[in-house]
Image (spheres, grey):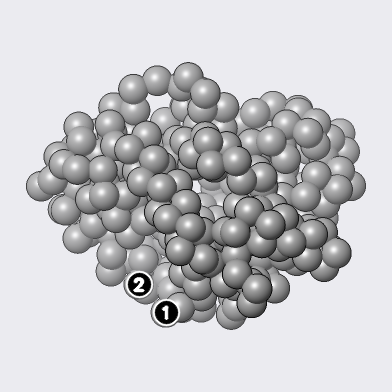
Amino acid sequence: MDASTAGRSARALELLHSLTYFVPESQTGLEEAGLTGRACYFAGRAAPLGAVGAGVVAATFYNFNREAIEPFVPAAWSIVSPERIIEIRYRAVGDAYTRLLGADVVSSPGMAEAAELASIAASHIPGDDGRPLYSAYAELDWPEVPHLRLWHALTLLREHRGDGHIAALQTAELSGIQALITHTATGKGFEKEFARKRRGWSEEQWNDGVDALKDREILDTNGGLTDHGNDLRELVEDITDDLALAPWAALGDEGAARLVELGSPWRDSVVEQGVFPDGVFGR
């Protein structure tokens, strides 16, 4: 198993994790508990960290404007406890998987096999040094039902990879907003306006970030990546893949390929059902 294969495997399955941020079950469940608007996302994802402040959420999420978080965190914890939010979120994921994939799929031998494979990978994450968000999720109890075990394992793998990605971005001296700008400039991730608004950055802040990247010759005069910018983004992705290799290496090429084979049709079905809004992803 090489690092690039591990990275492709992780990216192939990531939507089966991130659907939780878009399905109505998550939003409705948290709203019924008393949260509103963006508090559902910030408190939902950060809940395993405990009742932390906006600074911790901004640091661990990395490319969000802290000013966008402050109206919701830490106020959310006085409305719903982190422990209750975790319960709601996991129940919502289970309901969403069942609705989107069907009861037959979530109870199928294929789902049980996928959950087992993903669990093997996640259980071989070597440690939590420098991985705060992964560490928080790793302290949660493992669900017993296969489709929730799959989601939990994919979440551990995703947050472990994400923590490593932040380390890579720091190595490249890219701030949160600069990381987001260069990400959109690749044309393969979030589209610019979705990213800017969703992450809470004003046009002035965004433009200042663009200017700083132009000064470093990472962006050209039109806002596209220069050769240096492309090389830097490739370096960031290579470091990210290297730092996330261990669990996938433990699963092995055959196991990883089988997990992707099982999960890809489910991912495609979720996409085809319009879970993710228009304008989220580029080409």
Residue 279 quadrant: bottom right
Residue shown at the point (24%, 57%) measured from the top left: 260
Q: In the figure, 32 relative to 88: above or below? A: below
Name the element at disc 1.
helix
Residue type highlighted by circle 2: Asp
Q: Give x and y (percent) for residue 75.
A: 87, 38
Decide which of 207, 211 is in the foreground and name it: 211
Decide which of 229, 98 is in the foreground and name it: 229
Q: Give x and y (percent) for residue 46.
A: 66, 38
Whether residue 271 sits left or right of residue 68 in the image: it is: left
Classed neighbour count for the residue bearing mark 2: other residues with Cα under 10 Å, few (<14), some (14–19), many (≥20)? few
Residue shown at the point (60%, 64%) measured from the top left: 219
Whether residue 252 sits left or right of residue 107 in the image: it is: left
Residue 76 quadrant: top right
Q: In the figure, 247 relative to 28: above or below? A: above
Residue with the mark numbered 1 = 272
**Label 2 to label 1: alpha-carbon separation:** 6 Å
Classed neighbour count for the residue bearing mark 1: other residues with Cα under 10 Å, few (<14), some (14–19), many (≥20)? few
Q: Is residue 122 visible?
A: yes
Q: In the figure, 9 relative to 61: above or below? A: below
Residue 152 quadrant: top left
Residue shown at the point (57%, 27%) measured from the top left: 132
Q: Give x and y (percent) for residue 138.
A: 47, 27
Question: What numbered label is drawn on residue 268?
Answer: 2
Residue shown at the point (23%, 50%) measured from the top left: 5
Q: In the figure, 100 relative to 66: above or below? A: below
Q: Is residue 37 visible?
A: no
Question: What numbered label is drawn on residue 248?
Answer: none
Q: Mark 2 and 1 residues: CB-CB less than 8 Å, in contact?
A: yes
